[in-house]
Amino acid sequence: MALWSGRFDGNVDEFTQRFGASLPVDKALYVQDIAGSCAHAAMLAKQKIISKADAKAIQDTLAEILHEIEKGEFVFNLNDEDIHMAIESELIKRIGAPGARLHTGRSRNDQTVTDTRLFAKKCACELMEANMGLREALIACSTEHFSTIMPGYTHLQHAQPVLFSHHMLAYVWMFTRDFLRLQHALDAADASPLGAAALAGTTYPLDRKQTAAALNFSRVIPNSLDAVSDRDFLLDLLYACSVSIIHLSRLCEEIILWSSTEFGFITLSDSYSTGSSIMPQKKNPDFAELIRGKSGRVVGDLMSLLMTMKSLPLAYNKDMQEDKEGAIDAAQTLKDCYECMRGMISTLTVHDDAMYTQAAKGYLAATDVADYLVKRGLPFRQAHEVVGHLIKLCEERSCDLEDLTLQDFQAECELFESDVLSSLDLQAITRSRTTYGGTGHKAVLAQLDEATNALCSNRKTFTSLAATIVPSH
Ligand code: ARG
């Protein structure tokens, strides 16, 4: 019998009952649902809306149900539409009238979004932790291969030499920004809708501040209509997940390229590679490809909720039941991808020689030769032209800039002297990029410190936020 059977003569068709149900998805929120109900019952008793004895019976029985679900002993009745009804109907079955008093001054409309907000806070927190684990691995990799030189690219063409550590730190900063986006998503979810009831508030003297505090929400949503119809916090979480998995997809793309025979910059550990069922020689970067592929799915989850929310009138609409599946999926997917990437980075082998050999090809010193002339008084545009001629000469002779003689250099410009050859040294070239944020060794060392300090300060923030996540029962 449905909880609203009073107004109905017939039961809903069996297929539509299943079609309308969200239990298969929202049963993941049982901890949050029970925490919300316990907080509501305690507040009802304190406000003398129900008796203390009823509140205790409700809380004790909910604790029993929680325990049974956790042990896998609770049998879900698939006729229950959602986790809220599954737990409430079992409560009523077990204790009768006191259980039937729990829903006083509450609607599933404020209940479902209370649970979802608590769940979103937990997801954001777990993602922040996994995000820091990945950053730690990237920082360790940058430290270990600090002075390895690789070609830096623009348009995927050799551009200027850079330190491999500098390249990896670029990803650390992307993930550092993602941490802040996740922290924002956690804060967006951190407001209590409980007590908004169906849409308009209620005639019972509820204490919304008390339930908010019991559930570790830092504030109460001021408008009951907004409380039941706002899903911005999930969009914020989905956006944070989407941007971060896009960052992961860029890193994956480089890992895939770098592990190819053409590049040969890295070798992935066997635990992060697969073979081929037909080609015995193959070692494939499957997991990097899979993370790259999963980025489509997470961005799809964001698009899906944006479209679901579009044009919805206030306040609650059943459309919004579609909110949880994508959010749960995106959070779980990103968490798994962070973890997989952390392992991949911690175990890969970096081939310093192969990177250096490639950095020595493609005239990566060209900008520095032009700068050499600029330092001797030639305007940059003219210096650019002179070096362009030298590169053309190298191409005609199929040689590198190092293979030209001083006479070759001086034939193009008399400002060249014998020290020009030292301006071609890759070590010297990278070292001289001393500007803040540049690839020079000193600048990268300072950057490494800055990235490590950001991680340490995020760890402190995380510890204090994580303490507010587990809802009290
Ligand atoms: N299962 C619903 C959801 O997740 C719960 C709220 C239902 N409210 C209602 N009036 N039908 O959105």
Image (tube, rainbow, N blue to C red):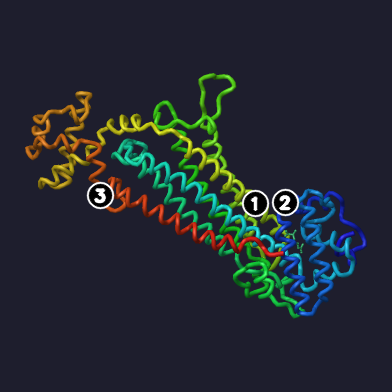
> Which residue does the numbered mark 2 point to in the structure image?
25
Q: Are the two marked residues, 2 and 1, in contact with CB atoms closer than 8 angstroms?
A: yes
Tell me residue 310's x, y (percent).
Answer: 62, 59
Q: In which quarter of the view is residue 56 placed?
A: bottom right
| Mark 1 surroundings: few (<14), some (14-19) or many (≥20) residues within 10 A | many
User: How many angstroms separate mark 1 from mark 3 (CA)?
Assistant: 45 Å
Quick check: 147 above or below 264?
Answer: below
Residue 304: where, in percent of width, then height?
A: 62, 52
Circle 2/circle 3 CB separation < 8 Å = no
Image disc number at residue 434:
3
Circle 3: element type: loop
Is residue 220 found left or right of 55 in the rendered image? Answer: left
Front: mark 1 or 3: 3
Question: The disc labelled 2 sits on which kind of residue?
Answer: Val
Is residue 433 left or right of 51 when viewed as pictured?
Answer: left
For the question of whether residue 20 can be seen, the reply is: no
